[in-house]
């Protein structure tokens, strides 16, 4: 040790400990969700097995509802901030979180998705009184041990705390105000999802393969994200989005470092939102994961990652817009076209929905390329609206997938869905509504959301993107209509599909998502007002 | 060139050489033990950089627990530990390229970000426990607390994936 440091130690006077300045009321939704997760872990340890599953459902539902109420209270109390653009709220918890308008809207959205997800997780009437999750993940698929565990009706009720952890991570991700917090949040939301992907009761090898792929590629993309953060730190000398923004607009340091950092961060985030060419994991994971998990993941991850992406690129890298916008344009175009064209070739319902999810990532990127501020529909409000409409329809569509079954579990081959309209008209109509919303047909939420991202892009001068977007929508429409024709008019194969009778849990999910999809299409006003009032990001 | 610089260079050299031996050693136990030397030398570098708490944490956690954990894992899993136990795969050249590229890129980041920085030795702020605690439990308190959630989720996950029995 050098002489200097020894002297410094001796000379240092003890200073009183100052408590960090955290406004617990403002971050209460996040704390409630993480608290519910920890409570779930305790339930796992102390509640007898017979009551455990039900207790977990209760803890999760109460936690999500309480957090939703807290979010509404927090949202109502946000102060308006006047600057170049109007915003509401601001940084809290020592600057780690920015609880602003978009953050609160995203929290509410994620909690809504979380509630629907928990209801789907809780469904036990479809598979002989057992949940969609494997009895014991440690038993080899098809082994005597596995049958023994199933006979004992052992269940993995740990999925509820894991889902709460993921939900907490998503909420943190959407509101983190520095890159370090974002990385931590990314890990919190990803790790439980990797795990839950591998826990399917049926087709376990496929499920485990999906979990492995998701984990490896996810770890890889996290590394990209982290590396990008390191580069940006090297450029700006800070993790804070506000400090980076200042550094970007005053153009200190080497621009190459900034460009490389932005590119790597973009790669990490585009992986999470499943944009081409970082989409390869999506079909496999969506197909292999237990369908309730797929539903939760498709809606939640996309929402959290898109809001985080908008926050990073609008707040921190807003001054370098002309450096990143071309990349976003290019990726939006190939993602929309690839997603639309590839979904045409699919024969599996879950893979088809996965490719549709990829195409929707493209449409959302169109919104990102749009107007950042102004009187019209801004990028942030368009993307928020889109995420609500897409998430609701996606959860609904996957909920329908859980109900169409044969002896081996869910029957996801598209050919087997022929004649669903005769077997269960209600379910077929519900699925049709979701497909029409994905396609962007008027009177569904999908139409208004496509219109709003296209309007934002048009006002922002990104009209070529709008043209490609309309072409891709038309291509996708062709495919969705084909599926609708298959559901109602094609002759059924063999005995046709059977529709399991679910408990009120899944029914209510389908009913709620159908209602949201139609209400957003017919009466989009209230939500549009809400997302526009949410205003811009506040750093 | 001050004495500090000389010691710093020597420590760095020790770290580099022992790290090289970690990846080239023929026996897996030897590799693990060389890792102790590497981590110890890095701890020495931390001391020279006036990050004393980080140095002690490095000694306690990395040299102490992590390497012991590695050795335990080797002992408990019946992995061969004799000569030739650390045979490399055919991917070694590829790994070399990736590691080399990462080193160059990270070095470039450090150079570009902090290349011109000159640290005034009289102004050095020693990384005492008080300072570090101040940073972790004030500025970064929320990410720190949320990080513990990752660990908890990972623990739950590990139990989910491995637990047998009928509890």
Image (cartoon, coloured by chain):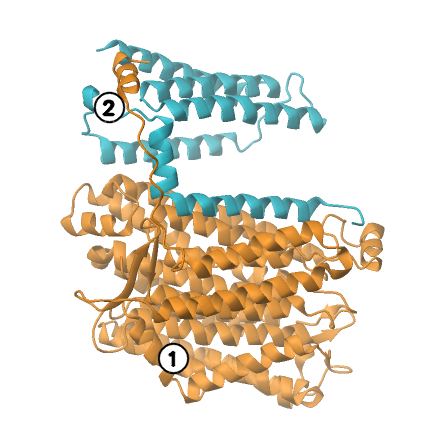
The chain in orange: A
Left/right placement of residue A347 relative to residue A481 reads right
Parent chain of label 2:
B
Considering depth in this image, is A139 or B141 the residue closer to the camera? B141
| Badge 2: residue crowd in 10 Å (few <14, some 14–19, many ≥20) | few
- Where does label 2 land, which residue? B124
Considering depth in this image, is B143 or B62 the residue closer to the camera? B143
For the point 72% across and 54% down, the residue is A47
| Badge 1: residue crowd in 10 Å (few <14, some 14–19, many ≥20) | some
Mark nearer the viewer, 1 or 2: 2
Is residue A338 visible in the rendered image? The answer is no
- Where does label 1 land, which residue? A527
Locate residue A113, reporting x and y percent. Answer: 51, 69
Locate residue A486, reporting x and y percent. Answer: 62, 84
For the C terminus of chain A, the quadrant is: bottom left
Parent chain of label 1:
A
The chain in cyan: B
Which type of secondary structure does the marked residue at label 2 adopt? loop
User: Going by the picture, which residue comes out furthest to the left?
Assistant: A250
Is A210 rendered above or below residue B36? below
Locate residue A137, reporting x and y percent. Answer: 71, 51
Is A52 rendered above or below residue A398? above
Considering depth in this image, is A196 or A7 the residue closer to the camera? A7
User: Going by the picture, which residue comes out furthest to the top?
Assistant: B3
For the N terminus of chain A, the quadrant is: top left
For the point 68% across and 59% down, the residue is A200
User: Going by the picture, which residue comes out furthest to the front?
Assistant: A16
Is A26 rendered above or below residue A145? below
The answer to whether marks 1 and 2 mark residues whose Cβ atoms lie closer than 8 Å is no
For the point 39% across and 78% down, the residue is A449
């Amino acid at each position: 040790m050098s002489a200097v440091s020894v002297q410094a130690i001796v000379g240092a006077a003890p200073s009183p400990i100052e408590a960090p300045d955290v406004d617990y009321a403002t971050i209460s939704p996040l704390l409630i969700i993480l608290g519910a997760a920890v409570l779930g872990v305790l339930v796992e340890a102390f509640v007898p097995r017979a009551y455990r599953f039900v207790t977990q459902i209760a803890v999760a539902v109460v936690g999500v509802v309480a957090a939703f109420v807290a979010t509404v209270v927090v949202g109502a109390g946000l102060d308006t901030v006047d600057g170049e653009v109007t915003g509401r709220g601001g940084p809290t918890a020592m600057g780690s979180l920015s609880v602003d308008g978009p953050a609160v809207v995203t929290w509410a959205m994620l909690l809504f998705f979380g509630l629907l997800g928990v209801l789907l997780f809780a469904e036990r009437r479809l598979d002989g009184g057992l949940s969609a999750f494997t009895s014991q993940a440690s038993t080899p698929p098809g082994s005597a041990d596995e049958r023994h565990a199933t006979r004992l009706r052992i269940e993995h009720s740990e999925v509820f705390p894991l889902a709460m952890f993921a939900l907490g991570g998503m909420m943190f991700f959407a509101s983190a105000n520095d890159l370090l917090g974002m990385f931590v949040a990314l890990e919190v939301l990803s790790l439980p999802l990797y795990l839950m992907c591998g826990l399917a009761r049926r087709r376990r090898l496929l499920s485990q393969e999906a979990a492995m792929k998701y984990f490896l590629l996810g770890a890889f993309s996290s590394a990209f994200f982290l590396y990008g953060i390191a580069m940006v730190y090297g450029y700006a000398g800070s993790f804070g989005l506000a400090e980076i923004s200042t550094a970007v607009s005053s153009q200190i340091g080497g621009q190459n470092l900034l460009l490389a950092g932005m590119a790597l961060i973009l790669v990490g985030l585009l992986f999470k939102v499943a944009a081409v060419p970082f989409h390869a994991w999506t079909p496999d994971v969506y197909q292999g994961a237990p369908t309730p998990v797929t539903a939760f993941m498709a809606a939640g991850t996309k929402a959290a990652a898109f809001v985080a992406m908008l926050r990073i690129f609008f707040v921190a890298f807003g001054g370098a817009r002309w450096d990143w916008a071309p990349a976003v344009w290019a990726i939006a175009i190939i993602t929309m076209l690839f997603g639309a064209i590839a979904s045409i070739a699919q024969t599996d319902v879950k893979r088809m929905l996965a490719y549709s999810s990829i195409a929707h990532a493209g449409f959302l990127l169109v919104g990102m390329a749009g107007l950042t501020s102004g009187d019209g529909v801004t990028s942030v409000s368009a993307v928020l609206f889109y995420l609500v409409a897409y998430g609701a329809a996606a959860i609904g569509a996957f909920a329908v997938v859980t109900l169409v079954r044969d002896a081996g579990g869910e029957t996801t081959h598209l050919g087997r869905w022929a004649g669903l309209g005769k077997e269960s008209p209600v379910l077929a109509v519900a699925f049709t509504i979701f497909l029409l919303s994905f396609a962007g047909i008027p009177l569904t939420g999908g139409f208004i959301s496509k219109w709003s991202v296209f309007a934002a892009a048009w006002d922002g001068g990104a009209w070529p993107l709008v043209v490609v977007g309309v072409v891709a929508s038309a291509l996708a429409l062709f495919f969705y209509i084909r599926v609708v024709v298959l559901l109602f008019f094609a002759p059924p194969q063999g005995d046709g599909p059977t529709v399991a009778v679910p408990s009120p849990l899944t029914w209510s999910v389908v009913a709620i998502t159908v209602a949201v999809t139609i209400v957003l299409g017919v009466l989009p006003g209230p939500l549009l007002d809400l997302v526009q009032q949410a205003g811009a990001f506040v750093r | 060139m001050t004495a500090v610089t000389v010691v710093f260079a020597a420590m760095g050299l020790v770290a580099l050489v022992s790290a090289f031996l970690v990846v080239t050693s023929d026996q897996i136990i030897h590799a693990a033990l060389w890792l102790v030397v590497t981590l110890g030398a890095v701890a020495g570098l931390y001391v020279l950089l006036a990050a004393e708490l980080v140095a002690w944490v490095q000694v306690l956690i990395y040299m102490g627990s992590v390497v012991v954990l590695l050795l335990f894992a080797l002992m408990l899993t019946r992995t061969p530990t004799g000569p030739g136990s650390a045979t490399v795969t055919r991917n070694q050249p590829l790994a070399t390229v990736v590691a080399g590229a990462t080193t160059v890129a990270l070095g470039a980041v450090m150079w570009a970000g902090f290349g011109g920085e000159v640290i005034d030795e009289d102004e050095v702020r020693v990384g005492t426990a008080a300072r570090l605690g101040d940073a972790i439990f004030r500025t970064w308190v929320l990410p720190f607390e949320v990080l513990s959630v990752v660990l908890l989720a990972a623990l739950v996950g590990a139990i989910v994936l491995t637990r047998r029995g009928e509890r």
